[in-house]
Image (spheres, rainbow, N blue to C red):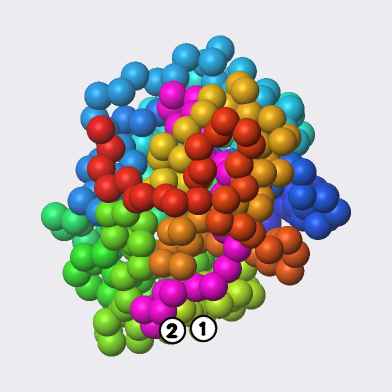
Amino acid sequence: MTGRRRWKAVTRKLRELGSIGSALAGTGHPYMAHIVPMRRCNLACTYCNEFDNFSNPVPIEEMERRIDHLGRLGTSVITISGGEPLLHPDLDRVIARIRKTGAIAGMITNGYLLMPDRIQRLNDAGLDHMQISIDNVMPDDVSKKSLKVLDAKLRMLAEHADFHVNINSVVGGGIANPNDALQISERALGLGFSSTIGIIHDGSGQLKPLGESERTVWDQVRKLTRRSYSRFNHFQEAIANGKPNDWRCRAGSRYLYICENGLVHYCSQQRGYPGVPLSSYQTADVKREFLTEKSCAPNCTISCVHQVSYIDHWRAPQKTHVTPPGAAAHGDVSPLVQIQ
């Protein structure tokens, strides 16, 4: 690791520790928000319900306004997702605006559009974290996010990226060869990246237990990646065993999902709840949703919401109905199965 990379890694870690300290000190602000600047994707993985093949990018001026609203709410981490965010023509400005608010800037991408000059632009914009999910070793009918296709991109990242890179492998959800996850994780660690493994949810983001061979691979990968944050809670363990989790979901509060239309949702799989404009979202909404019980929580597999909510696992029991006068209750949540 070069001196520049080492210094950036140290300062990034200090900022992350500061954000966690702020979250522990008070519950009146979001810890993480996912924001979508581009619903269109250059791939069409069969298990994914978060993309289309026609949407235009959100205009950069509107993206900057939305990011400023997240800054107004005190959001600690803002992660760009999609669709495929690298398709957005002004992505560098989006990242720079996130950093201007003081937030940690992350991105989830399929990695197909990465080249050395593009990676350098992401460095210059101030990207802190990148996650790439790789589903298999060889492309198939389920997913083209394959190690064979992306290995050259991973080598580019290892050579040029100043930001942290995490490679997420997966089991479940129709992945044909569970053993691919182990090979992907070993390759990621060999290149100096961090590695995690996830369980692909069904079309509504709900629980689907692992089969015997999937569980074996999942255990093997986790032994390689003991530093993964998910090892500090029991969410993934219960999901792998097909058991519900008893937890307090803080979606709509500590975690926000901002769609391409600028609306606040609980998560990518509960679009429509609460479904209000980010521009009108206030600290009072954050505090209300912190206390609102979500009926979809027991069988949820959305790990980012699990992990963010875990910060506050020890405080503030939730209630089925916590709504302001004249507002509809959001506690009874129905899954969104398909993007319209």
Q: Position of residue 79 (x, y in %)?
A: 56, 41
Q: Give the answer, above or below, for where 168 lies relative to 171.
A: above
Q: Are marks 1 and 2 in contact (CB under 8 Å)?
A: yes
The correct choice, above or below, for 165 with respect to 274 in the image is: below
* Residue designated by label 1: 223
- How busy is the neighbourhood of tag 1: few (under 14 within 10 Å), some, or many (20 plus)? few
Q: Residue at x 66, y 25 (%)?
A: 69
- Residue at 82 percent across and 50 percent down: it is 26
60 with respect to 279 (left or right): left
Q: Where does the magenta region start and end?
A: 239-265
Q: Is residue 252 magenta?
A: yes
Left or right: where does residue 182 sit relative to residue 106?
A: left
Relative to 10, residue 224 above or below? below
Front position among marks 1 and 2:
2
Local crowd at mark 2 within 10 Å, few (<14), some, or many (≥20)? some
Image mark for residue 219:
2
